[in-house]
């Protein structure tokens, strides 16, 4: 079913979304060019650094990400409640960090930042518009993709498209769809065979979370993720990523602890490496039952997430409620949701 994005991504409302983009020209855009042997892997770091920067400006939580050789995944949560709490001055200041005003000619100098801020403050309607943009999914992804495209085209000394189309996205309607999608993104490198363990999955949120957790909880010289059984409920409030579980400073994204999420991804990754998708490790089944996933369908769901679901992802009841909300009779994915989720 084709739907205009404005129907299911509703500006001004909190929502969780899976966004993904693919390169248009050749696979080496984020990897090694097989013809020239030139390595373009450094561009993956561009995306991570840009995500960090945008997360510090926008009222948008970055919950998970994965940068692969020719595409990227971002799981984002829009937070209009945070944008509503900002003063007009903060809105103007944040906007000018991502869209600074440029002089109309090279001979003229840019106006001082205080003058630019005051010019925006003089227009309440403009401030209201910018407040909406600073919690907008489209504006966040636009500032991410445009920046990467311009940088890559400059490096390649070419013009034209870098991404094959506008970013695609899926609405994640409930906890189980969010957990499954985050695991899908974090396991992308293992599925592709470029990593063997979550902590070795470069340019993924799971690697960043594990390394930060190990630094805070595991003694020097110990590096195995298996030691993550140690209890730690103190998520890092200073991390740029949205915390897994809520703290006194920040609202988390999942209803499970950070250690439980690590365990889920680690055990799922082991199943992928073994190649035995027909049976589930007994240690993994209780975790899946607890979060609302069907163990017998988990590996198929977490490796074929984009294929199984389209506009929205969630349990059958969540899909029905969302279809009613946006004024359609049904959404693709109902039978697959019934097979995948409790």
Image (cartoon, rainbow, N blue to C red):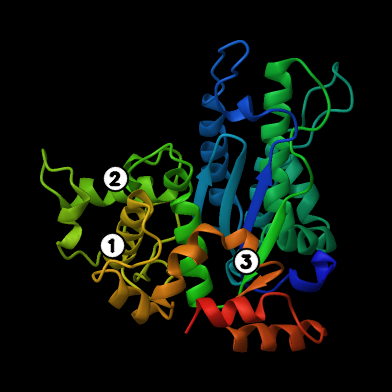
Percent across and percent down for residue 329 are 81, 87
User: Is 19 or 235 nearer to us in this picture?
Assistant: 19
Q: Earlier in the sequence, mark 3 or mark 2?
A: 2
Q: Which residue, given by chain and number where applicable, does mark 2 sit on?
A: 211
Q: For the point 70% across and 44% down, which residue is it?
A: 143
Q: Which residue, given by chain and number where applicable, does mark 3 sit on?
A: 308
Vertical side of 144 occupied by 104: above or below: above
Taking the image as shown, residue 215 lies to the left or right of residue 187, namely left
Taking the image as shown, residue 85 lies to the left or right of residue 246, namely right
Vertical side of 153 occupied by 130: above or below: below
Q: Which residue, given by chain and number where applicable, does mark 1 sit on?
A: 263
Q: For the point 11% across and 40% down, which residue is it?
A: 220
Q: Earlier in the sequence, mark 3 or mark 1?
A: 1
Q: Say few, some or many: other residues with alpha carbon within 10 Å of mark 1 (under 14 / 14 to 19 / 20 or more).
A: some
Q: Secondary structure at mark 1?
A: helix
Percent across and percent down for residue 79 are 59, 67
Distance in Å between CA atoms under marks 3 and 1: 24 Å
Q: Secondary structure at mark 3?
A: helix
Taking the image as shown, residue 62 lies to the left or right of residue 133, namely left
Which is in the foreground here, disc 3 or disc 2? Answer: 3
């Amino acid at each position: 079913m084709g739907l205009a994005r404005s129907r299911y991504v509703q500006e001004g409302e909190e929502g969780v979304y899976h966004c993904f983009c693919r390169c248009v020209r050749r696979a080496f855009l984020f990897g090694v060019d097989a013809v020239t042997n030139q390595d373009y892997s450094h561009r993956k770091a561009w995306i991570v650094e840009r995500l960090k920067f945008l997360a510090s400006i926008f009222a948008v939580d970055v919950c998970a990400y994965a940068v692969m050789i020719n595409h990227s995944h971002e799981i984002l949560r829009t937070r209009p409640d945070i944008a509503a709490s900002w003063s007009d001055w903060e809105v103007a200041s944040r906007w000018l960090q991502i869209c600074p005003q440029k002089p109309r000619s090279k001979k003229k100098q840019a106006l001082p930042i205080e003058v630019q801020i005051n010019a925006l403050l003089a227009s309440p309607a403009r401030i209201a518009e910018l407040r909406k943009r600073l919690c907008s999914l489209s504006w966040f992804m636009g500032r991410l993709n445009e920046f990467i495209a311009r940088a890559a085209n400059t490096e390649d000394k070419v013009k034209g498209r870098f991404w094959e189309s506008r970013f695609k996205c899926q609405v994640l309607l409930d906890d189980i769809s969010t957990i499954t999608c985050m695991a899908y993104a974090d396991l992308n490198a293992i599925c592709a065979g470029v990593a063997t363990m979550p902590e070795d999955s470069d340019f993924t949120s799971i690697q960043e979370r594990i390394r930060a957790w190990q630094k805070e909880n595991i003694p020097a010289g110990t590096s195995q993720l298996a030691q993550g059984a140690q209890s730690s409920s103190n998520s890092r409030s200073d991390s740029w990523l949205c915390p897994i579980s809520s703290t006194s400073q920040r609202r988390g994204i999942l209803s499970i602890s950070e250690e439980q999420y690590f365990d889920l991804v680690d055990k799922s990754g082991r199943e992928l490496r073994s190649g035995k998708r027909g049976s589930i490790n007994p240690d993994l089944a209780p975790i899946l039952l607890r979060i609302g996933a069907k163990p017998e369908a988990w590996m198929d769901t977490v490796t074929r997430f984009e294929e199984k679901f389209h506009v929205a992802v969630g349990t059958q009841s969540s899909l029905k409620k969302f279809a009613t909300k946006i004024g359609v009779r049904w959404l693709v994915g109902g039978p697959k949701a019934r097979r995948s989720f409790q």
